[in-house]
C-alpha cells in the first residue's frame, strides 16, 4: 500500500492552514473596511448628514463590492473543523448585504414624488439597515478572531464562553 501525504487523506497540513489564514485575513479585512464605510454612510443618512444621491450611488458600489467579496469567500476552502464557523461568517455577510439593500430601499422611498419631506418611513429603513449591517459586522469580527486563533485539535467555536477562555 502506498504511503500518502496527510493532505491526500483529507487532513490539512500546517502550510494549508497558514495559507487559509492568510487568505481569510486578507479577504475579511477588505470586507470589514467596506462594511465599516457603509455603516458610517447609512448612519449619516439617518442623521441627514449626507447627500441622498451620492449616498445611494455609494451604497450601490458597496453592495457590488461586498457581493464580489462574498463570491470570492465562497471559493475559499476552510479546514473541515472550521466549516461551521466559515459558513456562519458567510451567513452574516449575507445579512449585511440585506442591510445594504434595506438602506437602498429607504433611499428609493425618499425619491418618490408623493412622499412628504418629513416622512419617517425612510428613517425606519435606514435604521433597520444600519442595525443589520452593524450587528453582522460585529459578529463577523468575532468569527474571524475565532477562525484565526483556532489550532488543530481544539474545538472550533465562537461563543462568549470560548472568548473568555481565550482571554
Image (spheres, rainbow, N blue to C red):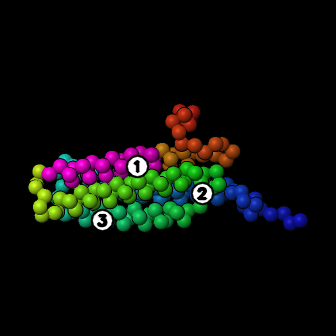
Which circle marks residue 137 in the picture? 1
Q: How many labels, in total? A: 3
Q: Residue 146 placed where, x, y %?
A: 54, 45
Q: Residues within 10 Å of mark 3 (few under 14, many from 20)?
A: some
Q: Residue 118 placed where, x, y %?
A: 11, 51
**Is residue 86 visible in the rendered structure shown here?**
yes
In which image quadrant can residue 12 be found?
bottom right
Is there CB contact under 8 Å for labels 2 and 3? no
Tell me which secondary structure the magenta stretch mostly adopts. helix
Which circle marks residue 78 in the picture? 2
- Describe the element under mark 2 as helix, strand or loop: loop
Residue at screen point 65% across, 54% down:
80
**Is residue 55 visible in the rendered structure shown here?**
no
The magenta segment: 119-141
- Describe the element under mark 1 as helix, strand or loop: helix
Residue at screen point 27% across, 63% down:
58
In which image quadrant can residue 105 be found?
bottom left
Q: Is residue 3 magenta?
A: no
Of the image marks 2 and 3, the number of the one nearer the N terminus:
3
Of the image marks 2 and 1, the number of the one nearer the N terminus:
2
* Farthest-out residue, right: 1
Residue at screen point 49% across, 52% down:
89
Residue at screen point 31% across, 66% down:
61
In the rendered structure, the answer to whether residue 137 lies left or right of residue 5 reads: left
In which image quadrant can residue 161 be found?
top right
In the rendered structure, the answer to whether residue 75 lies left or right of residue 123 reads: right
Which circle marks residue 60 in the picture? 3
Amino acid at each position: 500500500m502506498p504511503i500518502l501525504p496527510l493532505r491526500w487523506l483529507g487532513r490539512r497540513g500546517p502550510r494549508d492552514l497558514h495559507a487559509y489564514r492568510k487568505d481569510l485575513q486578507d479577504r475579511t479585512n477588505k470586507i470589514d473596511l467596506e462594511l465599516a464605510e457603509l455603516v458610517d454612510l447609512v448612519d449619516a443618512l439617518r442623521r441627514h448628514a449626507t447627500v441622498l444621491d451620492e449616498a445611494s450611488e455609494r451604497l450601490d458600489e458597496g453592495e457590488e463590492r461586498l457581493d464580489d467579496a462574498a463570491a470570492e469567500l465562497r471559493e475559499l476552502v476552510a479546514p473541515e473543523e472550521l466549516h461551521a464557523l466559515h459558513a456562519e461568517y458567510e451567513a452574516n455577510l449575507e445579512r449585511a448585504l440585506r442591510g445594504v439593500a434595506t438602506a437602498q430601499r429607504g433611499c428609493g422611498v425618499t425619491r418618490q414624488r408623493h412622499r412628504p419631506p418629513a416622512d419617517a418611513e425612510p428613517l425606519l429603513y435606514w435604521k433597520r439597515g444600519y442595525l443589520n449591517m452593524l450587528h453582522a459586522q460585529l459578529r463577523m469580527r468575532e468569527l474571524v478572531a475565532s477562525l484565526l486563533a483556532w489550532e488543530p485539535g481544539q474545538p472550533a467555536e465562537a461563543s462568549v464562553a470560548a472568548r473568555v477562555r481565550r482571554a
